[in-house]
Image (spheres, coloured by chain):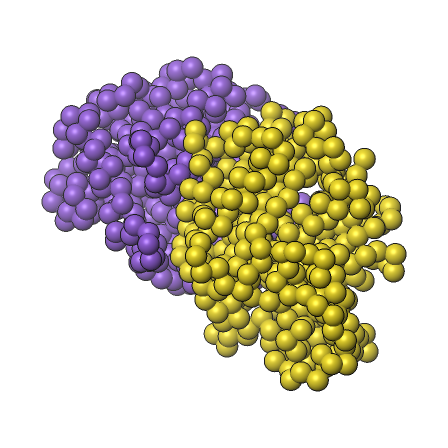
Amino acid sequence: MRDIAIIAFGQTENKRTERLLNEAEMIAPVVGDLLKSVGLKRTDIGFTCSGSSDYLAGQPFSFVMALDALGAWPPINESHTEGETAWALYETWVKMQADEEIETALIYGFGRQSMGSPREVMTLMNNPYLEAPIQPDTISQAALQARVMIDKGIATEKDFAEVAVRNLKHAKSNPLAQCSGDFDAETLLKDPTIASPLRKHDCPPITDGACAIIMAAGDKARELCKRPAWIRGIEHRIDVQALGQRDLSECPSAKLAAEAAGVSKGKVDIAELHAPFTPQDIILQKALGLGDDTVINPSGGIHQGNPMMGTSLVRIGEVANRIINGEADRGVAHGSQGPCLQQNIVTVLEGE
Amino acid sequence: MGDRCAVIGIGQTKHTDKRLDVNQTGMIRESCNRALKDANMTWKDLDAVVIGHAPDTIEGCMTPELYQAEALGMVGKPLFRVHTAGSVGGSTVIVGSKLITGGIHEKILVVGWQKMSESQSTWALSPVIPFQPALMAGAGGFFAPHIREYIRRSGAPEHIGIKVAVKDRKHALRNPFAHIHQESVCEEEIRNSPMLWDPIRFGETCPSSDGSCAMVLVSEKHADRGSAKPAWIHGTEMRSEPTIMPGRDEVNPRSGSDCAKSLYKQAGITNPRKQFDMAEVYVPFSWFEPMWLENLGFCDEGEGWKLTDEGATSMDEGGDIPWNCSGGVLSSNPIGGTGTVRFAEAALQVRGQAGDRQVDGAKLALGHAYGGGSQFFAMWIVGSEKP
């Protein structure tokens, strides 16, 4: 395998509602600043790939206008995945394995959840014949998952609240975070439930935001970055969707992806988990085999912000940045999409 | 470039206006099962699936591949979604081929699909977005001005568009999978069909189809496993440019010509008209044949319509470079799968599996797809011999 690294990551401030800028205007400065930070021109980039969702933007081909933000001229070598951007990074990694003339790549993702009601929109992710007509929304589905965990004695509502307390505490050191602060679980548990047993702190924020990563191969990465975050493993797997067909308290596809990516081959200093709901954080720690010696979600995780479709790329970027600046030597980034952690991608990053 | 990649299984559904007998997944599986049978493989043999689908708004589902994962045999395996507008059926195949040439997997399936009867595609693709130019009643309204500009520049006579439509619809009669089988088709019939977006008549327009097309791609080690000799990939390329940019040429887009140049370089093509035995090119409105003949370097700029006029692209007229032997997009158009069909038809030809639409002794063929406002291009070259 060719050695490929992440050499830069940037994102917008995570906001509940971005009123002034459209998608292209959100992406343009992030990409511009990122290129400048590593001394590249946009015409130096060998491959570009993005992730987004037409349903969040409320229009078909929403990624097409985003392309205008890149100033894609002369024409660029480019692709797009409909969904979470960590998969766009995977596609780029594959492309760079196959095409050795590609030395650098740009990956960007964006989501503007404020354009609609994500809770309602995402009911359309379900089987259109059997499930979507009864409109099972994301929070209710996650609540079913949480309920299974409680019933099986795996975790309590207090355990869920502790995940939020940890994330919100970590987010205090993140200047771009949407939510942060010092809380205690007992106080949080006094809040009413939204979909029992989930409370507000168990759910992801609604966020408008954009993010981008620059990748480079081999010596090019070393030339552009003092300490690149090398991709030592990147794998994705999917589970069956129908909620009755799997034990929701476990996440077999995340476990398979983590094993294939080689998470356990060394000490994991930090891990960023794409767990939109707090119970999923607990499921994922187990699936990925993470122990007490790993700092989970140093950025604040999902509470930092949830620019959906970009969220999974932020996880990779937050791990990469900590390796690039020397805070960590080895880290794991996880991305997910679909109801109840259905599809999962695991990236293992290392410094040299 | 790493390992070689071969196509050893090809399957498509009979494209039609409404598949009421199957749901989305059933239709997709039909094409996949045919491709797997052709490859002498089963679902269990597959390392991964790459799936292409154009706007989800057409079916009213968000990322439908998630609920389809189980039916696609991918539980516990990698399932990857591609969406690059109308070129997606082609770029899906290219993304899949990189999994093989990059040494990630050895046996994968690529599939592109759309079940357009589940909504009204013209309106699904034409929302009114604040502060953005409207697409104007579907793709035809968007592309008609490009065609008028082509006619102005080239001085092409009116019958060229009609001639392309007759040729492709006649080709479609040779293809049992084509959506439109217009037995009576002739110049008069097309000329008398209603004008939709001047100069595009109803008869010069692609249909909306329910359909799916799949291919099994493998590394060299598995290349002889299929029921026919493999088609070898000689080159793949993608290019994109912005929709709206001062000075951009929508009629002869640079992303298309750049894409072709880079592709031809990979396969040593210097004279496409001579070196290719046939081409399957994304022609959703008849006039795009002469436009793409020029854009893809089959002739000089302004000369494309002359090739069409002299019958160079027609099987029935014994043309030297048949285009769209399958009947093309003008005869079948399941959007997310339309590019996959182009790529697959090129592969069928070099495998000698094209039945009545077979070009005798086809050894090298071009597959082409485009999308958005003539701004996303995906192309490949397949051959009967190893690259």
Q: Where is residue B360 in the image (x, y as percent from the top left)?
A: 40, 24
Residue B164 spot, x, y in % from top left: 24, 34
* Rendered position, B202 above or below B248: below
Where residue B31 appears, as percent x and y from the top left, is 49, 49
Instruction: Name the quarter where the N terminus of chain B is drawn.
Output: top right
Q: Chain A is drawn in which colour?
A: yellow
Judged left or right of residue A173, residue B48 is left
Q: Which of A293 and A172 is in front in this view?
A: A172
Residue B7 visible here: no
Q: Tell me the quarter of the picture where residue A198 sits.
A: bottom right
Q: Nearer the viewer, residue A86 or B341?
A: A86
Mark yes or no: residue A15 visible.
yes
Looking at the image, which residue is at 88% across and 56% down?
A293
Which residue: 60% across, 73% down? A139
Q: In this image, B198 relative to A115: left or right?
A: left
Image quarter for residue A150? bottom right
Say which quarter of the image contains residue B326: top left
Q: Which chain is purple?
A: B
Q: How many marks?
A: 0
Quarter containing the C terminus of chain B: top right
Report the front residue among A84 and B342: A84
Task: Look at 44% across and 60% down and name the residue there.
Answer: A19
| Looking at the image, residue B267 lies above or below residue A286 | above
Q: Which residue is drawn at 58% across and 55% down?
A: A13
Q: Position of residue A201 (x, y in %)?
A: 67, 73
